[in-house]
Structure formats: C-alpha cells, structure tokens
Image (cartoon, rainbow, N blue to C red):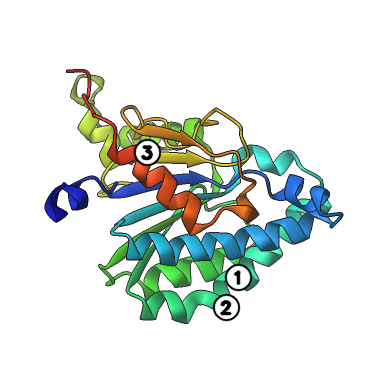
Amino acid sequence: MSNKSLEKSVPQHIVIIPDGNRRWAKKHGLEPIEGHKQGLEAAMNVVKGSKNLGVRVLTLWGFSTENWQRTNKEVGYLMRIYTVFFKKHLKELVKEGVKFNWVGRRDRVPKQLREILIKLEKATSRNKNYILNICIDYGGHDEIIRAVKKVLKKGVKPSQITEDLISKNLDTAGIPDPDLLIRTSGEKRTSGILPWQTSYTELFFSKLLFPDFSMIELKRALDDYSLRQRRYGQ
C-alpha cells in the first residue's frame, strides 16, 4: 500500500466515549475521583498521540446531561478536576496549535469552569493545526432540540428547514462529521453522542477501561478502520 493510500485511511475526525474511569478506580481499590484523574491523563495522551498520527479532529465526551443524576459529591469533584485540568493545560494547547471547542449546554456548569472553557475557546480560536471538542453537559437529544430552537428563533418557516440548516445550528457547525467512534470499557452502545453527525460513522469498541487506553489501542482502532469500506448507503 502506498504512503498516499495509508494517509487517506486515517480517520480525520474521531469521537471517543471514555468509559470505565470509576470501574478502573474500584478495580485498583481507589476512590472514583482517582479514576477520573487517570482518565484525564489518558485523554491528554490521546490528544497528543492522535495529532501525531494525522487525525485532525478529536471529540471527547467528558460529562453528559444524564451525569447530573450522580451524587452531588461526585458531580462537584468532577467539575473541580475539569477546572484544574484545563487551567493546567491551557498554555500547552495554545502552543500546540490546538483549536478548542466546548460542545454542550453552557447554562448549568459552575461559573469557574464555564469561564475557563470559554477562555480556552477564545485563546485558541485562531489555531488551525488540530481541533479538540470537549463535550461537557452534553446530550445528543438536547443538542438537536437546541438546534431546532435556534432555527425557529430565526423565523425560519417549516418548509425551509433542511438537513443542512440543522447541521449549521448544531454545536459542531463547520466541523466535518466523525469518521470513527471509539468507546472503551467493553460497552457496545453510543449513548446518544452526536446522533445527527454519526449516521455513517464507523464504530470500534475497546475492552480496555479508559485509564488503560494507550496509543497501542488507538493504533489498533485506526488499523481496524483502515480495513473497512465505507459505502454511505451505496
């Protein structure tokens, strides 16, 4: 296979559902927060590694709309460690040419986290090397409902609503649809992440708990993807 064909086989947009942080912590006799901390370090390694492999867009699910149903204690420390994590890596992301996007609702997360995420977006807005989408307070149905509300607010008539119009009002407007979705921990479902955008996305389910997810496993997913023929209904 030529270098050119190898390059074409690399998915340009990958979505990862980083599942298994709490199970990893329990397996190692640790508190759940330690699993989330290890998961964030694994996520940063994936960002750096996927960028070097030719991936142009990475979407990571950090906190779903359903995660608010967890205990106040767990939700609270999740919000705190996200705040600390993004503060820590802000300069690095800017330096590496990463364009950061916050995907999800913006009215419910704590003020401190909201401010750092918006600051990250502004600080990296001109970067073009690599796009990193972080889904925080994100739900697939919620995203579509918000997109429809945006369209209706603009006074668009029902007869004028098209797929393209909906796409342009989603949180991922202007970003190519995902080529590959990876979920860790052995669970085999998408749980509603980017339902509009993933209609033809290839799926890869890893048995590894996310804190154990390494570049070796990422390369295995990419190798598996390169062997597939994407038909798009043809």
Report the residue at 43% width, 46% height from top: 220
Q: Which mark is residue 85?
A: 1
Quadrant position of residue 203:
top left
**Residue type highlighted by circle 2:** Lys
Residue 140 in view, yes or no: yes
What x and y, as percent, mark residue 223? 35, 44
Report the residue at 39% width, 77% height from top: 94
> Disc 1 versus disc 2: distance between alpha carbons?
5 Å
Query: In the rendered image, which residue does mark 3 sit on?
Result: 224
Q: Along the polypeptide, which appears first: circle 3 or circle 2?
A: 2
**Residue type highlighted by circle 3:** Asp
**Residue type highlighted by circle 1:** Phe
Name the foreground residue: 105 vs 153: 105
Is 213 placed above or below 160 here? below
Q: Is residue 198 left or right of residue 158?
A: right
| Marks 1 and 2 close (CB-CB < 8 Å) | yes
Tell me the crowding category of disc 2: few under 14, some 14 to 19, or many 20 or more residues within 10 angstroms, Cα based. few
Q: Secondary structure at mark 1?
A: helix
Q: Secondary structure at mark 2?
A: helix
The number of callouts visible is 3
Query: In the rendered image, which residue does mark 2 sit on?
Result: 88
Q: Secondary structure at mark 3?
A: helix
Q: Is residue 167 left or right of residue 206?
A: left
Numbered disc in front, either 3 or 2: 3
Residue 179 in view, yes or no: no
Report the residue at 55% width, 31% height from top: 191
Name the foreground residue: 123 vs 177: 177
> Disc 3 versus disc 2: distance between alpha carbons?
34 Å
Q: Quadrant of the C terminus?
A: top left
Q: Is residue 127 left or right of residue 116?
A: left
What x and y, as percent, mark residue 107? 56, 52
Query: Residue extending furthest front?
Result: 1
